[in-house]
Amino acid sequence: MIQPTTRRQRAADACRQRFHEKPYKPGTRDCPLLALHALRKVGVSVPWAKGLKWKNEAEGLRVLKSLGFNSLIEAVDSLGLPRIPPAMALAADLIALPTTHQLGALAVSMGNGNVLAFTDQSPNAEVLTGVTEFAKDDLGPCAWRVI
């Protein structure tokens, strides 16, 4: 049996290999696909994600709304994953970051306070350290334990 910590680290490493230092391209390499990759690698089923396709941000927003979600935060919440304080994130947990994008921005925890994310400041997915600002909603900072 694979230990949960090992599975988590493998999932985070798979995200790093697939996305790190690669350019943002909606529908191919973006934060929803980064988060979905992490979820799949730890074995979390995302039934509403099957067959989803988009080519730009506007189309991605239409797809998200067609599923009944106003944001990526709502979409992740629909999976029933427990909310956690972002500072408690383990490898492969999901964290929402503040962004100018209507959809929102999801990052994958690499562990030890590092996150892999697409940001407004870089054209490529980067590992960020020392992140202290997180997206918030009525329930507080948005981060989820991927179990």
Image (spheres, rainbow, N blue to C red):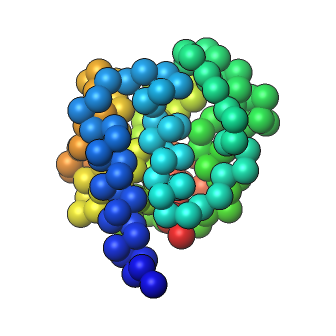
Whether residue 39 can be seen here:
yes
Whether residue 138 can be seen here:
no
Q: In the depicted view, which residue is nearer to us: 66 or 104?
A: 66
- Please report the residue visible at 48 percent of the width from the left and 58 percent of the height from the top: 41
Question: Compared to 9, does 39 lie above or below?
Answer: above
Q: In the depicted view, which residue is nearer to us: 86 or 140?
A: 86
| Residue that protrudes farthest toward the left in the picture | 129
On the rendered structure, is 1 left or right of 52?
left
Choose top left, top right, bottom left or bottom right for residue 17.
top left
Give the quarter of the figure containing the N terminus: bottom left
Instruction: Give how far across and how far down residue 49 sits, in percent.
Output: 67, 42
Question: Compared to 77, does 101 lie above or below?
Answer: above
Q: How many labels does the image show?
A: 0
- Please report the residue visible at 20 percent of the width from the left and 48 percent of the height from the top: 129
Q: In the depicted view, which residue is nearer to us: 25 or 74?
A: 25
Instruction: Give how far across and how far down residue 92 sits, in percent.
Output: 40, 59
- Please report the residue visible at 40 percent of the width from the left and 81 percent of the height from the top: 3
On the rendered structure, is 103 left or right of 119?
right
- Please report the residue visible at 71 percent of the width from the left and 21 percent of the height from the top: 62
Instruction: Give how far across and how far down residue 33 sits, in percent.
Output: 50, 38
Choose top left, top right, bottom left or bottom right for residue 93.
bottom left
Instruction: Give how far across and how far down residue 106 sits, in percent.
Output: 46, 41
Give the quarter of the figure containing the C terminus: bottom right
| Residue that protrudes farthest toward the front in the picture | 1
Question: Compared to 78, does 118 lie above or below?
Answer: above
Question: Compared to 101, does 135 lie above or below?
Answer: below
On the rendered structure, is 113 left or right of 48?
left
